[in-house]
Image (cartoon, rainbow, N blue to C red):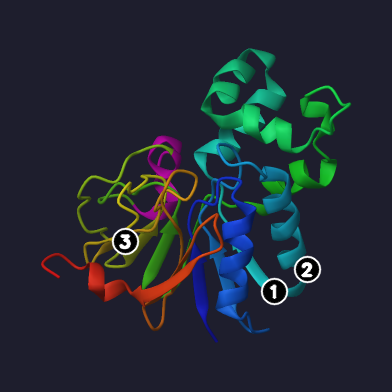
Amino acid sequence: MRTLTISDIHGCSTAFETLLQALRLQPDDTIVTLGDYVDKGPDSKGVLDRLIDLQRSYRLIPLKGNHEVEMLAALENPLECTSWLEAGGNETLASYSTENQEVSLANIPQAHWHFIENSCVDWWQIEDYIFVHANLEPDLPVEKQSEYCLFWQKFHNPAPHCSGKIMICGHTSQKDGKPVNLGHAICLDTWVYGDGWLTGLEVESGKIWQTNQQGQLKTTWIDEFMPGK
């Protein structure tokens, strides 16, 4: 049994599909995705379609990211739509629109809204790890974390969490394309929608797979990113 975690996909379906193929998924795998499936990249629709498909065949634990939070806010309150569009929502809407269609939230199928609202969770934990989109307040149990911390707070040398568990997160894009591994906290957002990579981690072994929108693949180990390495 493997626990595989994948960070911010941001509409980059080519990198996502390349990564899934490289992972060679097995029926007893658990796949933890860290949120931010939409916005910025060219194919948010394709990413959500693939996640829903994975959910049918594997144990998928999809977390919610701040971009899903913004997308839901745009649906519920038109006044929030402008800020979402400026944060990458324009690219998301374009992925749902054919050449002759008006660009509109109405083009997004109900199955995609249902996935974001009902399947995506705020956090997930196992014996030695806590998975979140953005960050954790070190002195609060995970169930008492604020929405700001879970979805928005940047990863800047966070202190160890009071649970003693290792935090695995995304959200704070590493423009050099390299994960950050502090030992007690790991950030896997490696800027796939820019010039970086989409990163997947096998928690048990520490193996890292990275893919990009050009279909390239490379592998390494999370310990290679410890301070001083």
**Furthest residue to the top?**
79
Please, what is the three-letter code of the amino acid marked with disc 3?
Ile
Q: Nearer the viewer, residue 45 or 196?
A: 196
Can residue 147 be found in the magenta stretch?
Answer: yes
Please, what is the three-letter code of the amino acid marked with disc 1?
Tyr
Image point (60%, 23%), residue name: 85
Counting from the top left corner in percent of width and height, residue 162 is at 25, 59
- Residue under numbered circle 3: 186
Quarter of the image for residue 166 reads bottom left
Can see residue 117?
A: no
Q: Secondary structure at mark 1?
A: loop
Name the side, left or right, on which 155 lies relative to 8: left
Q: CA distance from mark 3 to mark 1?
A: 24 Å
Report the magenta residues as a range: 141-151
Task: Name above or below for residue 156 compared with residue 91.
Answer: below
Q: Residues within 10 Å of mark 3 (few under 14, many from 20)?
A: many
Mark number, residue 56:
2
Can see residue 155?
A: yes
Q: CA distance from mark 3 to mark 2?
A: 29 Å
**Furthest residue to the bottom?**
1
Name the side, left or right, on which 103 lies relative to 137: right
Q: Secondary structure at mark 2?
A: helix
Quarter of the N terminus within the rendering: bottom right
Q: Residues within 10 Å of mark 2 (few under 14, many from 20)?
A: few
- Residue under numbered circle 1: 58
Q: CA distance from mark 2 to mark 1?
A: 6 Å
Counting from the top left corner in percent of width and height, residue 144 is at 41, 46
